[in-house]
Image (cartoon, grey):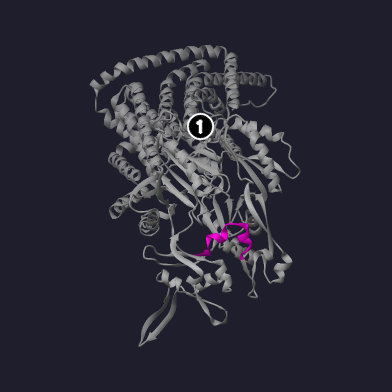
């Protein structure tokens, strides 16, 4: 029983299968997860270490160096980058693609544990974080009020509101930003402390030791278990004021006698504004396996409840990652339907038969239902990659159905068979060519499933989606379409077809004229084969020359509608001054019609280690997130908007450096910037001097924007020089002295208490402000020795002023400084080529090196992977064709159509103003597996014709005429199906539009040239074989060879 017989005999099973496919697809579509794009980052972990009171140099030496030495032996480690700043270190470890990030984090934690005893005791416990794109907030909620102050809002955000949002399904964590944080301040009078012979540390210990909530074990009384709990915590401020501080000789002093105790707010180090209004931000991060859209929907539902519970608070969504994702999915889904419509119209133009067109059209939604179902089973997501793949697949999935229906109708009309017999025989006859045609496409995509690295992470979902679609299209074409063809042939739509023929008749007349033109051109080409080869070679050379000089980029930019402004004021700038500069930018944004909202983070939250483009944030830094109207609703592009904004920010005084960039501005979210020029060497100061000079040179390169150094050497610093002999004589160590100095400036937060207005409030012990305002007051800090003595700092140390780096960076254990930047519309490869010329001639001291890294390095590796995949694609296609034709020669003839694609790709990229990129190379790979199908039809028919006794020239002429219609129908359906993606009609489609543009251009060129150059090559080879046989026959007649030779 062949496939056609199965389809008709078990029609109820086939119909049930079709219904089941629809239901399965609808379920999958309603439950499949969505996201903007796949996570393409290599497995990464980041170690954050707090080292209070230490300079960047001390952090690098005492913390980072021993950790780097330990991490260097970790399995699978590919990159090790550290950033040392005042009080904190960040070490990023990148591992091989494919490594389990959970296991990597465990290995890193074990390494941290091993060296814990070798680093300074004052280092706080390191935190090992797993890095993922899902670690970024998916929603930022703004809280503001006309009746409640920021202190109360902050308290609600941390306690009740924060708790409610944390319980929302899919939420991993929440963080607050901005506002005033309540604290209990114990302001010590340094002179009174000295008079009583006390130190800050003693006062802090007395507070901690007398503020106790602790278990006291359990007691068994009359066979009953009773838990014991010690609760001697502070109940109010008066308890703290009346705390007795022990003195020598058994006396005591009340804390209120030596300190001022009050409820106040922490020193402001962060501020948040939404659309220019002071607010509190709640930033919500989703769980790694949660769906962004669903989590945001859940959060919005909870916010509706919170609005009822807290009517005096204005809850507003400041940032919402799901907005662009939803718009992108909706736009691309519309593009899928548009592509389906274009394809149906084209089929109708060719066939002029409503029932046949309907049958072919039905195959597409059935295929996509199965495809989405398979995506759901394989835990794939709908994003810009997979949706682009669905659009790309439309033309390919209909090819099989077209060929099957066309062949069935040929058997019915031309051979006079009834529909059932025609369906059985026609499907059987065409089944192997259909399967073979699909195989040539599949074999070029399958290697993408196994390649590692960025290319694999980016394109594996696309390849898998196309594989699902094309594979299922064969099943639909061979099993379901024959039955549908027989069923729907009974329905006649004569009136509709009569109306349609108004368009289809002229169209088919046009196609006949094109066919006649081809036939005439082919006759001329067969007579002048050498001239035709010369023409093709010239076209190939010109196209290749254009592609070589056109420029290369890793991934095309896309207009996400979200911009970021990161700025840094001069070191030492107060938070209020930073906020004032930000206010100027906010005023500019409020007057822009295309801006629909913006929020601003100024400064930093303690212990949050938030990163900006200039490192871990300080009070002199700010980040503004700007939301624009969707690309399709505004006149200017996001890059035009950003260029205008840069010019305006450049006029604001005191902003030391700033970056304006779009969301998705780098190919990988872990990249600092597209341009990264790294200078390496042993001396950070000399690295900085070299970077100053190189930065100015790189700014002169056309196409560069936002050029800046990764750190500055302008931090003011007071260097405390210890008298080592005197320190040792007193039984002290440098570490003990440093900790006491830090406490005297920053204070001690050793315990907490519950207040009526807030729970778990920090109790801060510090000197009164007048004791922290000069170098003289610093030198009067009282240092306690192990013998109980108390001496001023000036007796064991001196102070001098200097400048230093605010950040120290290392890459793979070597000191580095990076010059970072962005690009405009000029080709990335042209920009890096000009930069490389500068680097090649730049004089460097011995032991120092400079080079382009970051995206340039990633692009080189990725392009090599893509070219390797292209070579594999060509080899695999050849190996598929050899057994099909039982020849090693005919596959070469067929594959001659592959190089022809660049004749179409070159002008297509030029017209669309696109550069060569990874999507373009993927398009070439895809073309390698699809354009050969047209050649297969021509060569296969030519062989059949030749075996039936036609001459070589007549065989190819007849083959082209008989195969012209199916070739044009399948090729043009491929083209029109990709038009929505090529035309960038959907948000986010810019990233993969070059793929569609390359396929459209390559498919058109290969299709039109295939019907000329492939017959010419075939005829050339066949004529050569014929002459070769004749010469062998003549030799055998003379007896030179005992056996005849065959040419394969």
Left or right for 987, reference 524? left
Image quadrant occupied by the N terminus: top left
The one nearer the camera, 795 or 319, is 795
State the SS at label 1: helix
**Residue 922 on image: x %, y %:** 52, 34
Depicted 316 relative to depicted 913: above or below: below
Image quadrant occupied by the C terminus: top right
Depicted 253 relative to depicted 685: above or below: below
Residue 794 picture quarter:
bottom right
Q: From this viewpoint, is residue 985 visible?
A: yes
The one nearer the camera, 16 or 444, is 444
- Residue at 40 percent across and 49 percent down: it is 279
Residue 162 picture quarter:
bottom left
Count of numbered tags? 1
Is disc 1 surrounded by few (<14), some (14 to 19) or many (20+) residues within 10 Å? some
Q: From this viewpoint, is residue 429 visible?
A: no
User: Which region of the structure is painted magenta?
Assistant: 764-781
**Residue 524 on image: x %, y %:** 53, 11
- Residue at 69 percent across and 65 percent down: it is 796
**Residue 576 on image: x %, y %:** 49, 48
The residue that label 1 is drawn on is 643
The one nearer the camera, 905 or 877, is 905
**Is residue 770 shown in magenta?**
yes
The one nearer the camera, 41 or 139, is 139
Depicted 131 relative to depicted 419: above or below: below
Residue 197 picture quarter:
bottom right
**Residue 568 on image: x %, y %:** 54, 44
Depicted 26 relative to depicted 217: above or below: above
**Is residue 621 shown in magenta?**
no
């Amino acid at each position: 029983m062949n496939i056609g017989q199965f389809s008709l005999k078990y029609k109820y099973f086939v119909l049930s299968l079709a219904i089941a496919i629809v239901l399965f697809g609808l379920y999958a579509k309603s439950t499949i997860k969505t996201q903007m794009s796949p996570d393409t980052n290599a497995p990464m972990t980041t170690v954050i270490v707090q080292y209070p009171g230490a300079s960047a140099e001390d952090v690098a030496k005492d913390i980072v160096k021993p950790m780097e030495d330990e991490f260097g032996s970790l399995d699978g480690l590919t990159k090790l980058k550290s950033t040392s700043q005042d009080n904190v270190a960040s070490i990023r470890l990148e591992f091989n693609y494919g490594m389990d990030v959970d296991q990597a984090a465990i290995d890193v934690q074990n390494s941290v544990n091993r060296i814990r005893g070798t680093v300074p005791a004052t280092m706080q416990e390191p935190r090992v974080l797993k890095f993922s794109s899902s670690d970024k907030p998916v929603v930022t909620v703004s809280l503001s009020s006309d009746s409640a102050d920021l202190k109360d809002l902050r308290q609600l955000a941390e306690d009740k509101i924060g708790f409610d949002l944390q319980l929302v399904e899919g939420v991993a964590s929440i963080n607050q930003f901005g506002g005033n944080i309540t604290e209990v301040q114990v302001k010590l009078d340094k002179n009174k402390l000295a008079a009583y012979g006390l130190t800050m540390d003693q006062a802090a210990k007395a507070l901690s030791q007398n503020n106790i909530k602790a278990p006291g074990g359990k007691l068994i009384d009359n066979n009953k278990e009773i838990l014991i709990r010690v609760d001697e915590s502070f109940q109010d401020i008066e308890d703290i004021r009346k705390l007795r501080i022990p003195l020598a000789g058994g006396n005591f002093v009340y804390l209120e006698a030596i300190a001022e105790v009050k409820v106040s707010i922490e020193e402001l180090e962060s501020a948040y504004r939404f659309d220019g209004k002071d607010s509190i931000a709640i930033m919500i991060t989703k769980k790694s396996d949660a769906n962004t859209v669903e989590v945001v929907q859940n959060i919005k539902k909870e916010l509706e409840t919170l609005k009822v519970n807290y009517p005096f608070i204005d809850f507003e969504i400041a940032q919402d990652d799901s907005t662009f994702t939803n718009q992108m999915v909706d736009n691309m889904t519309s593009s899928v339907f548009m592509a389906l419509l274009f394809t149906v119209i084209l089929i109708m133009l060719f066939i002029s038969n409503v029932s046949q067109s309907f049958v072919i059209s039905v195959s597409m939604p059935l295929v996509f239902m199965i495809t989405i179902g398979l995506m759901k089973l394989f835990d794939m997501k709908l994003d810009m990659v997979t949706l682009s793949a669905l659009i790309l697949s439309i033309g390919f999935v209909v090819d099989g159905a077209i060929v099957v229906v066309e062949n069935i109708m040929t058997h019915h009309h031309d051979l006079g068979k009834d529909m059932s017999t025609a369906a059985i025989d026609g499907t059987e006859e065409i089944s192997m060519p259909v399967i073979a045609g699909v195989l040539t496409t599949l074999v070029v995509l399958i290697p993408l499933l196994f390649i590692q690295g960025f290319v694999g992470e980016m394109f594996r979902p696309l390849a898998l989606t196309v594989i699902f679609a094309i594979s299922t299209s064969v099943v639909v074409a061979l099993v379901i379409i024959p039955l549908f063809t027989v069923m729907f042939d009974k329905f006649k739509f004569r009136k509709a077809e009569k109306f349609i023929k108004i368009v289809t008749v002229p169209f088919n007349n046009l196609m006949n004229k094109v066919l006649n033109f081809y036939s005439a051109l082919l006759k001329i080409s067969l007579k002048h084969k050498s001239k035709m080869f010369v023409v093709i070679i010239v076209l190939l050379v010109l196209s290749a020359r254009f592609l070589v000089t056109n420029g290369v980029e890793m991934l095309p930019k896309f207009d996400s509608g979200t911009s970021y402004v990161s700025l840094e004021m001069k070191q030492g700038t107060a938070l209020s001054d930073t906020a004032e500069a930000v206010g100027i930018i906010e005023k500019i944004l409020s007057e822009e019609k295309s801006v629909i909202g913006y929020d601003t983070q100024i400064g930093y939250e303690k212990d949050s280690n938030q990163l900006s483009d200039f490192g871990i944030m300080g009070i002199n830094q700010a980040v503004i997130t700007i939301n624009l109207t969707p690309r399709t609703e505004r006149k200017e592009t996001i890059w035009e908007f950003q260029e205008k904004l840069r010019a305006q920010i450049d006029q604001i005084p005191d902003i030391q450096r700033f970056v304006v960039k779009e969301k998705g501005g780098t190919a990988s979210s872990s990249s600092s910037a597209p341009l990264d020029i790294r200078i390496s060497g042993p001396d950070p100061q000399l690295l900085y001097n070299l970077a100053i000079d190189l930065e100015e040179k790189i700014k002169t390169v056309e196409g560069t924007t936002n050029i800046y150094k990764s750190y500055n050497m302008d931090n003011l610093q007071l260097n405390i020089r210890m008298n080592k002999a005197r320190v040792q004589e007193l039984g002290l160590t440098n570490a003990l002295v440093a900790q006491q100095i830090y406490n005297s400036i920053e204070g001690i937060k050793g315990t907490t208490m519950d207040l009526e207005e807030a729970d778990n409030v920090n109790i801060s012990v510090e000197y009164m402000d007048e004791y922290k305002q000069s170098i003289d007051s610093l030198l009067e800090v009282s240092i306690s020795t192990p013998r109980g003595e108390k001496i001023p700092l000036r007796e064991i140390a001196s102070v001098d002023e200097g400048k230093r780096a605010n950040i120290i960076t290392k890459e793979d254990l070597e000191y580095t400084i990076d010059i970072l930047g962005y690009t405009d519309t000029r080709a990335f490869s042209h920009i890096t080529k000009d930069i490389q010329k500068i680097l090649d001639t730049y004089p460097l001291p011995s032991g120092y090196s400079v080079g382009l890294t970051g995206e340039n390095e990633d692009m080189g590796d990725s392009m090599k992977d893509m070219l390797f995949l292209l070579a594999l694609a060509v080899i695999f296609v050849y190996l598929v064709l050899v057994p099909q034709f039982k020849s090693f020669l005919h596959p070469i003839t067929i594959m001659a159509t592959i190089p022809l694609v660049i004749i179409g790709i070159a002008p297509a990229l030029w017209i669309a103003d696109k550069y060569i990129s990874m999507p373009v190379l993927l398009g070439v790979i895809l073309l390698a597996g699809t354009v050969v199908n047209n050649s297969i039809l021509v060569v296969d028919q030519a062989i059949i014709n030749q075996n039936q006794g036609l001459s070589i020239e007549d065989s190819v002429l007849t083959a082209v005429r008989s195969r012209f219609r199916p070739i044009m129908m399948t090729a043009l359906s491929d083209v029109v199906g990709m038009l929505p993606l090529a035309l960038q009609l959907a948000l986010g489609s810019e990233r993969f539009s070059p793929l569609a543009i390359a396929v459209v251009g390559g498919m058109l060129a290969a299709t039109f040239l295939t019907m000329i150059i492939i017959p010419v090559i075939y005829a050339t080879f066949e004529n050569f074989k014929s002459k070769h046989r004749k010469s062998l026959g003549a030799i055998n007649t003379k007896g030179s060879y005992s056996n005849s030779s065959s040419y394969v």
